[in-house]
Amino acid sequence: MPSGHTSAVILASGSRSRAAMLSASGLDIQIQPADLDETSVKDACRDQGKSVDFVAARLAREKAAAISATNEDVYVIGADQMLDCDGQWFDKPPNLEAAAESLIKLRGRSHDLVTSASIVRNGEEVWRLTDRATLHMRDFSDRFLDQYLSDVGELALTSVGAYQLEGRGAQLFERIEGDYFTILGLPLLPLLSYLREQELIPS
Amino acid sequence: MPSGHTSAVILASGSRSRAAMLSASGLDIQIQPADLDETSVKDACRDQGKSVDFVAARLAREKAAAISATNEDVYVIGADQMLDCDGQWFDKPPNLEAAAESLIKLRGRSHDLVTSASIVRNGEEVWRLTDRATLHMRDFSDRFLDQYLSDVGELALTSVGAYQLEGRGAQLFERIEGDYFTILGLPLLPLLSYLREQELIPS
């Protein structure tokens, strides 16, 4: 068995950064993005006054459960990331105008990234973890913002905050507190630890 | 001026991960690795009972100063990273046998990565920062170690701890505390902040 290879694990996420993180760490994991109506789940949760941690955990679990339903005996990893800025939840921007609006709202303030991962096997959640990081965005100029969006283009639409800290997004921040993998969208070290416990990767 | 481009800054380091971090963040910086006898500086500092923070800061400054000497009016970034495990300082392993020895010593224990950056202009240090992260290495098996070194190969020789956290090295760790950029070898966000203050990159 090659190091880290396992066919008994599926990542139920289409996120490039999650796949890249797992791949860089040496895992060869199948990818099957779950097709979930996240907006309706979020809206229902908001109406019920649920916390952002609750919503992220529920979305992660539902994504994993959806893929688990057609993959018997397979460990399915679901993940979700929510951005919370003083109680306002941000979604992935649908276009560059929306990305600019998000960044203008976040500029000069702190926000939290709440990242949740869930592992479901045969319909049952066998592991879960939710972690949080706090990011302090600097008060950049409008001119900087225009140049930033022109440089990153569509990549801004692939994350809830319209930035990648591992890329040009680093220039948006003053300070960050919390786990880097959590910021990228997956609490990698605890996840690897669980996969080792289950002997799905070598220990 | 394109975003982040500046010809008035040189990175005095041959480290691929430092260059990659700056490049990913959008900076187009010239690279001129300093040729410094690090071992003799470390040995002298150890004999004088200096702290690991002192040594990292001195090495960072000396690298920047060496390149500054032949580059008038240029901001030169020097950087160094020291690994401290219960008072023992680790160097980059010269070969895979030494890498295995390092990892066996670090296995199941915590160590600190002390990262220092210095900016020198016209021979004068104009900015510096030293930061520290603590990494908890898990008690992996000998078999895992063999497979790990066989997978990463010579890449193990490019860092003081014989690992890259951004790569397969993630499988070596239980837990990390501290800034990710510090772990990669450069306190990126404070460095960018200084470059903005000097109007070397757009703010």
Image: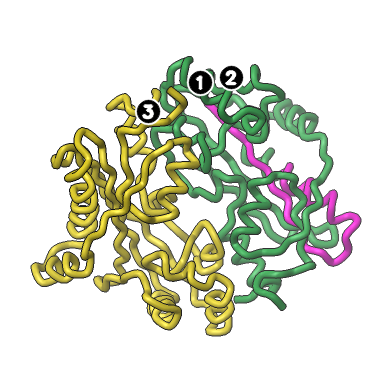
Chain colours: A green, B yellow
User: To which quarter of the image does residue B160 belong?
Assistant: bottom left
User: To which quarter of the image does residue A108 belong?
Assistant: top left
Amino acid marked by disc 3? Ile
Residue at 64%, 71% in the rendered image: A196
Residue B183 visible in the displayed image: no
Residue stretch rendered in magenta on the structure: A58-85
Magenta stretch encompasses residue A65: yes
Residue at 30%, 33% in the rendered image: B8
Residue at 61%, 45% in the rendered image: A185
* Crowding near the residue tagged with mark 1, few <14, some 14–19, many ≥20 C-alpha atoms within 10 Å: some
Residue topped by disc 2: A100
Mark 3 vs mark 1, CA separation in Å: 13 Å
Marks 1 and 2 close (CB-CB < 8 Å): yes
Which quarter of the rendering shows the N terminus of chain B?
top left
Amino acid marked by disc 1? Leu
Give the letter of the chain under mark 3.
B
Q: Secondary structure at mark 3?
A: loop
Res B201 label:
3
Q: Nearer the viewer, mark 3 or mark 1?
A: 3
Q: Nearer the viewer, mark 1 or mark 2?
A: 1
From the viewer's perspective, tell me whether residue A81 is left or right of residue B34.
Answer: right
Q: Secondary structure at mark 2?
A: helix
On whether disc 3 and disc 1 are found on a single subunit, the reply is no
